[in-house]
């Protein structure tokens, strides 16, 4: 970190984030070094603010229910059906595309290395196609992650693919 580079003292990020302008002035550094520390501190505060915003949004989805979280992750379909026939579609681009990508990647990994996930995928693939089957595995993983975040438990393959 810049703090270690300029002062030689080691400090963790939480200690650095709590520094004030007065604390920086007491370090007996040149004006350019203080400017560097102030810049690093400003960046850390800005990043923490963005992280807090993202966590607040995710927390609101976690409180809303598993279905809302999975929808936010783009792991559900948007077709409006009546009597098994498609009557329209919703907004498929609503939600977090990065979470959608991450869950599809996790689904591909799970199908490759997890036997219950592979069996579920094969059953789905026999009825539909590979893309729909991978999305179904991603949907199950997203629901499992929602419950993991909510109850603070570890992942259980048996509960996910039962």
Image (cartoon, rainbow, N blue to C red):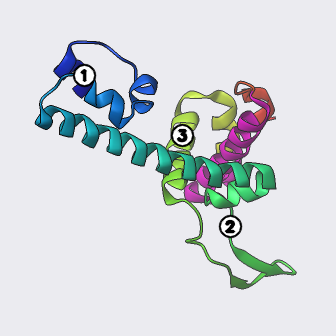
Q: Quadrant of residue 11?
A: top left
Q: Give neighbour class at mark 3: few <14, some 14-19, many 20+ (Cα, 10 Å).
A: some
Q: Quadrant of residue 156?
A: top right
Residue at the spot 63% in from the left edge and 36% down from the top edge = 118
Check the image and name the residue furthest to the right: 83
Question: Which residue is tagged 1?
Answer: 27
Q: Residues within 10 Å of mark 2 (few under 14, many from 20)?
A: some
Q: Nearer the viewer, mark 2 or mark 1?
A: 1
The residues colored magenta run 123-152
Q: Which mark is residue 42?
A: none
Residue 161 seen in this snapshot? no
Residue 149 appears left or right of 105: right
- Percent across and percent down for residue 21 are 34, 36
Measuring 82% from the left and 35% from the top, which residue is drawn there?
A: 162
Q: Give the residue number, with chain letter if any, for mark 2.
A: 77
137 on left or right of 82: left
Q: Nearer the viewer, residue 10 or 76?
A: 10
Q: Residue at x 27, y 12 (%)?
A: 9
Where 145 falls versus 10 (above or below)? below
Task: Reply yes or no: does residue 126 show up in magenta.
Answer: yes
Instruction: Estimate the spatial distance between the alpha carbons at disc 3 and disc 1, rounded to whole Å.
Output: 47 Å
Front residue of 2 and 66? 2
Give the CA distance from mark 2 to mark 3.
18 Å
Residue at numbered disc 3: 106
| Total marks in image | 3
Residue depth check, mark 3 versus mark 1: number of the one nearer the observer = 1
Q: Position of residue 67 (x, y in %)?
A: 78, 56
Query: What SS does tag 1 mark?
Result: loop
User: Mark 3: which secondary structure?
Assistant: helix
Q: In what element is the residue under mark 2?
A: loop
């Amino acid at each position: 970190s810049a703090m270690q580079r300029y002062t030689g003292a080691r400090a963790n990020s939480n200690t650095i984030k709590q520094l004030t302008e007065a604390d920086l002035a007491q370090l007996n550094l040149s004006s350019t070094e203080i400017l560097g520390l102030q810049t690093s501190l400003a960046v850390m505060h800005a990043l923490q603010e963005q992280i807090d915003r993202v966590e607040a949004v995710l927390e609101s989805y976690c409180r809303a229910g598993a279905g809302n979280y999975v929808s936010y992750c783009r792991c559900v379909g948007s077709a409006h059906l009546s009597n098994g026939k498609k009557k329209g579609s919703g907004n498929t681009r609503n939600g977090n595309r990065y979470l959608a990508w991450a869950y599809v990647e996790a689904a591909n990994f799970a199908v490759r290395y997890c036997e219950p996930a592979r069996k579920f995928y094969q059953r789905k693939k026999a009825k539909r196609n590979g893309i729909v089957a991978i999305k179904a595995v991603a949907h199950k993983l997203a629901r499992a992650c929602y419950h993991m975040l909510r109850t603070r438990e570890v992942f259980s393959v048996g509960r996910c693919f039962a």
